[in-house]
Amino acid sequence: MKYYSIKFFFIILAIITAHDHGKNRQIEFPNIPGFITLVCDLHMHSVFSDGSVWPDIRIQEAKKDGLDVIATTEHIEYQPWKADIPNPDRNRSYEYHSNFAKGSNVMVINGSEITRDMPPGHANAIFINDANKLITKDPIDAYLEARKQDAFIFWNHPYWASQSPDASVPLSEMHKKLIDEGLIEGIEIVNDTTFSNEALQIALDYNLTILGTSDIHGIVDWQYRIPSGGHRPVTLVFCREKTKTSLKRALQKGQTVVWFKKKLIGKEDFLIPLVNSSLKVNSAKYFTNTTVAHVTISNSSDAPFTLRNQSKYDFYNLTDLVMIPAHGEVNIDVRTIEKLRKFELQFEILSALTAPNTHPVVNLIVRPKQ
């Protein structure tokens, strides 16, 4: 009887743990001043190109992960299941996804993946009106048709080893012309489980929007080990409101930060406000008869921050490295030498990038309670 009671206890514990994880798996980041933060995955596939799931699964996954926006980006040229799933109307994937998303908070964007050899390689055109018109012999005509439909176009996995064996970005004259003519507006620096410093530098050099996507073909939970604490890569887009018009405008202006393997990557203009909105000095007070201030800093985001102290003060209870867990807090005892009404803590964020091998620096103002 005792054996069965213990066994029953662990079964119940497993159920509770699974339930809690399912509830907490949603990707959560705060808004920043003047903008709302939308969690977006703008590159994915279903059985309507070379994916292995029906569109309702993509919507269920998106709801579980707390996504605000997804784009249906089936391959235009690559249709391996067409013998079993004929697809003469390339808008059907968008129609199915939209229908399954009704009544949810998931906004669905119509898109397609222009799938060609390098150059130009693969690109996503999103916010299109008719995917069928992108079926052309000349790849440049597909880009031009997407532009005619006022699409937002971005270069997919430019460092993909299947098209670039050394995983470099083969930036050709064709790509430069497409960028100059506004036919490439963004670039994936993150695709699935991969990241490219070179793609990030190209985004900065050519003022392209920084994007990170799952490019998911199979099951999200399996690919990113979500039950074990992983997460899909997403693009955080900072918009005025949750509408397709506002989202497109924000993408065109480069108002993004990528969330990848628990790291944040983006331009300073938006990454630093996101960090500042995530971290908050909750309390500060000097220990009695000392000049050591006990400071509590909380984190309201999914990002576990690794910070390196750059302040003129050192710490009584920690080294120069400070870890703040996602949705958690840390206590720092700061040696200020004299009692101050206000002082500044400066940290280099080792878990974030604003350029290749470049970590941003943030300042937190502390006002100890007198």
Image (cartoon, grey):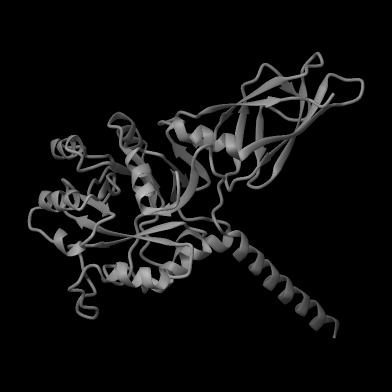
Name the residue at 21% across, 37% down.
Answer: 179
Residue at the outermost top position? 338
Name the residue at 52% across, 64% down.
Answer: 64
Q: Quadrant of residue 300?
A: top right
| Residue 90 locus on image (x, y percent) | 22, 68
Please indicate whether residue 45 sits to the left or right of residue 290 in the image.
Answer: left
Total number of numbered discs in the rendering: 0
| Residue 177 locus on image (x, y percent) | 15, 36
> Could you say which is closer to the camera, residue 306 or residue 102?
102
Name the residue at 53% across, 46% down.
Answer: 262
Residue at the outermost right position? 289
Residue at the outermost bottom position? 1
In this rendering, the answer to whether 228 lies above or below 118 is below
Q: Quadrant of the C terminus?
A: top right
Judge whether residue 192 can be spotted in this image.
no
Q: Quadrant of the N terminus?
A: bottom right
> Could you say which is closer to the camera, residue 237 or residue 295?
237
In this rendering, the answer to whether 236 lies above or below 201 is below
Please indicate whether residue 25 sits to the left or right of residue 194 in the image.
Answer: right
> Could you say which is closer to the camera, residue 134 or residue 219?
134
| Residue 63 locus on image (x, y percent) | 50, 64
Judge whether residue 368 can be spotted in this image.
yes
| Residue 366 locus on image (x, y percent) | 71, 25
In this rendering, the answer to whether 20 lies above or below 5 is above
